[in-house]
Image (cartoon, rainbow, N blue to C red):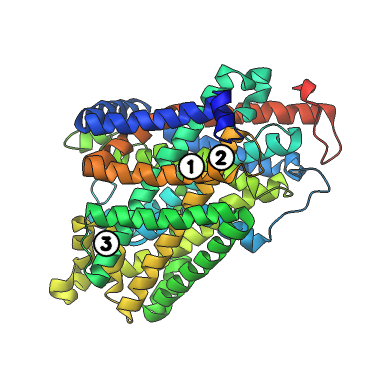
């Protein structure tokens, strides 16, 4: 494999590169040959994971959040990632926009209206009536819970671990480097390479789901605006165009490509949010932002530790009920691409202290998420009708967004904008924002996959980075062409199953960090000086 890599002009670990690429191709071939069988196999695996280990995912993410808060507030929080004299490479604003756009920008655009309306019309808790004030409060709380602190916990923990070991011990930019305190030199052997291959595949498949969501929403928006057919052909063309944009950004590089796209996109997304605030029920929404802080804060602990244990008594089909299809899937999906976000965030965070890193990555995007859902979610539920009196006054218009979400989740945001001025212009802007979020997620994922294969923070050869960028587009496109809806469903099942070993890896990062930090406290180094590797 080393000779083949040299002939192709690659600068990479040939085992990680070729095995990862081979597994990706084998999966696509299997999907082409037997999409239904693949879906059934992984559906059974997903059912087992959710039923038997759903509680473990919920417990795990909560414990990670508590661990991160403890480490930030402890004396270890003063440790600077990269040495005492290291300075942040990016301003706070650029840093925030890059980690946000590379993280869940596409997801917020997709679910900003659809998730609150989904929970509003189908309440999570048993006994809560749909469309009531209580249902609205619960809908808002769960929407932010799913995409707030807990989601960013799943990104922050591996990000901190990567930044710590990469910058303070000068280990390769790979997931396996985090486990040096536990594996020592075995990170360079079969165990370490297996860990890195899982990380590459998790990134490819996890990002593919986001690509699928983004493509569906862009196609739905274009259908609404221009009448373009919502079809397989349209989706493939969209993927091809946006993959081309992403590849261009990859070639330009992180500083000029991802940073510029991220800054532009977060500006447009913020402008869209302000537009809804100003042209909607402004006073109602301002009050909603303030009250949503209390809703989230007061319900965070009950929501975070609720694991549907009584579903077997309250749900007709028993099992995990509502939460198995929402919270548990969110955590398994998110953790599958946490190595990608973690390494990306670590890459742009050199020079910051552990305290700055943890608090910044946890709270800055979470606050933006809260404001986003407060504006879009409360606006959507107000349009739909909150409470019997409001719904009676709306008459036939009551439940219009609930019907839109039921019919097509990707179309929900565009149906929402039909209730605002400058509808066509705003819908067009929304399509552009989703498209750029798509591009930033794709190009940052490609750069990270390349780092996982090379073990080096410096960009690999252009052809190598372009290969991964094109691969992400090809995975999404072939799933749509070869297996249609069955292919996307199969991928979701795969991610849930694949999420389990990656979840265990991330859990192990807690113990690796604790062991390394204990060595620092024993040796009592000067702030900014790492302990010797031998002490681990």
Residue 411, placed above or below residue 479? below
- The residue under label 1 is 468
Task: Where is residue 264? Give x, y as percent.
Answer: 53, 67
Task: Where is residue 450? Give x, y as percent.
Answer: 56, 39
Determine whether label 1 and label 2 are within 8 Å by CB: yes
Q: Which of marks 3 and 1 is in front?
A: 1
Quadrant position of residue 25: top left
Residue 291 in view here: yes
Task: Where is residue 512? Give x, y as percent.
Answer: 64, 27
Residue at coordinates 61% horizontally, 35% vertically from top-left?
11
Task: Where is residue 198? Give x, y as percent.
Answer: 48, 29
Q: Which of marks 3 and 2 is in front?
A: 2
- The residue under label 2 is 450
For residue 220, the mark is 3
- The foreground one among 392 and 473 is 473
Sequence-first tag of 3 and 1: 3
Residue 55 in view here: no
- The foreground one among 390 and 352 is 352
Residue at coordinates 63% horizontally, 44% vertically from top-left?
459
Q: Tell me how far mark 1 sits from mark 2, CA to CA.
A: 7 Å
Q: Which quadrant of the rendered structure holds the N terminus?
A: top right
Mark 1: which secondary structure? helix
Quadrant position of residue 315: top left
Mark 3: which secondary structure? helix
């Amino acid at each position: 494999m080393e000779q083949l890599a040299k002939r192709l002009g690659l600068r990479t670990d040939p085992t990680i590169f070729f095995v990862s690429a081979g597994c990706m191709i084998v999966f696509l071939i299997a999907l082409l040959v037997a999409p239904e069988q693949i879906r059934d196999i992984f559906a059974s695996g997903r059912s087992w994971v959710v039923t038997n280990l759903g509680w473990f995912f919920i417990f795990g993410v909560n414990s990670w959040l508590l661990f991160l808060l403890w480490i930030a507030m402890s004396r270890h929080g003063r440790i600077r990632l990269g040495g005492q004299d290291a300075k942040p490479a990016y301003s706070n604003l650029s840093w925030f926009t890059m980690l946000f756009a590379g993280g869940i920008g596409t997801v917020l655009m997709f679910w900003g209206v659809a998730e609150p309306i989904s929970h509003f019309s189908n309440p999570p808790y048993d006994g809560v009536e749909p469309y009531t004030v209580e249902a609205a409060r619960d809908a808002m709380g769960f929407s932010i819970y799913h995409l707030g602190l807990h989601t960013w916990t799943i990104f922050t923990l591996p990000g901190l671990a990567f930044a710590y070991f990469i910058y303070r011990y000068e280990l390769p930019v790979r997931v396996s480097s985090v486990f040096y305190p536990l594996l020592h030199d075995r990170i360079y052997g079969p165990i370490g390479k297996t860990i890195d291959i899982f990380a590459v595949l998790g990134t490819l498949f996890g990002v593919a789901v986001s690509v699928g969501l983004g493509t569906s929403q862009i196609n739905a928006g274009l259908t609404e605006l221009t009448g373009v057919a919502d079809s397989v052909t349209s989706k493939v063309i969209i993927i091809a165009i946006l993959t081309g944009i992403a590849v261009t950004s990859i070639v330009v590089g992180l500083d000029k490509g991802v940073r510029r796209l991220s800054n532009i996109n977060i500006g447009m997304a913020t402008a869209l949010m302000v537009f809804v605030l100003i042209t909607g029920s402004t006073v109602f929404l301002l009050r909603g932002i303030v009250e949503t802080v209390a809703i989230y804060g007061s319900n965070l602990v009950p929501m975070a530790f609720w694991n549907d244990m009584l579903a077997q008594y309250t749900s007709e089909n028993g099992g995990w009920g509502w939460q198995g299809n929402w919270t548990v899937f969110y955590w398994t999906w998110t953790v599958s691409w946490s190595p990608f976000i973690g390494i990306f965030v670590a890459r742009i965070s050199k020079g910051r202290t552990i305290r700055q890193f943890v608090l910044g990555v946890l709270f800055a995007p979470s606050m933006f998420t809260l404001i986003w859902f407060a504006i879009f979610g409360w606006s959507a539920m107000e349009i739909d009708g909150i409470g019997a009196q409001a719904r009676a006054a709306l008459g036939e218009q009551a439940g219009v967004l609930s019907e839109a979400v039921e019919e097509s989740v990707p179309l929900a945001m565009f149906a929402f904008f039909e209730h605002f001025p400058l509808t066509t212009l705003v819908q067009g802007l929304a399509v552009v924002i989703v498209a750029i979020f798509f591009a930033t997620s794709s190009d940052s994922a490609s750069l990270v996959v390349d780092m996982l294969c090379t073990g080096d923070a410096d960009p690999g050869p252009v052809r190598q980075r372009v290969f991964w960028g094109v691969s992400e587009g090809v995975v999404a496109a072939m799933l749509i062409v070869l297996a249609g809806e069955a292919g996307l469903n199969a991928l979701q099942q795969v991610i849930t199953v694949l999420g389990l070993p990656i979840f265990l890896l991330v859990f192990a990062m807690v113990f690796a960090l604790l062991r390394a930090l204990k060595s620092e406290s024993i040796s009592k180094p000067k702030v900014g000086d790492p302990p010797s590797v031998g002490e681990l």
